Image: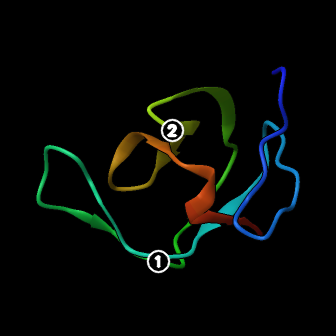
Amino acid sequence: MSDETRDSNGTLLADGDTVTLIKDLKVKGSSSVVKGGTKVRNIRLQEASDGHNIACKIDGIGQMNLKSEFVRKA
C-alpha cells in the first residue's frame, strides 16, 4: 500500500494484525450489530473504498470491511 494505515490511537497497522473495535458498529443491510470490544484477527489492509481500508472476517457475522478509525491494535 502506498500510504500508511493507522488505528484510532495512531499506531501503524499491518496485514495479519489483531485489532479491537472501539465502538458498536451496525452491519449494513442487516439488523445485527458488532459490539465494541470485539477482537478481529488476521486483518487485511486494502485501498480505501468509501473510507473502509480494512478487510476482515468477524465470527458470527462473516466478511466485512472496516474503517481504521474505529479500531485499535490489540
Residue 26 visible = yes
Front-most of 26 and 62? 26
- The amino acid type found where label 2 is placed reads His
Residue 8, position as x, y percentages in the image: 70, 66
Q: Which residue is mark 1?
A: 36
Color encoding of the figure:
rainbow
Q: How far across and down, in percent of the image, does residue 37 sit?
A: 54, 79
- Calculate the distance from the C-alpha at mark 2 to the C-alpha at mark 1: 17 Å
> Which quarter of the image is occupied by the N terminus?
top right
Regarding mark 2 in the picture, which secondary structure is present there? Answer: strand
| Image quarter of the C terminus | bottom right
Drawn side of residue 13 relative to residue 36, left or right? right
Instruction: Report the residue marked by disc 2.
Output: 52
Q: In the displayed structure, does residue 66 sit left or right of residue 16?
A: left
**Toward the viewer: 65 or 48?**
48
**Dot 1: few (<14), some (14–19), or many (≥20) neighbours within 10 Å?**
some
Residue in view at x 33 percent, y 51 percent: 61
Residue 56 x, y percent position in the rendering? 55, 40
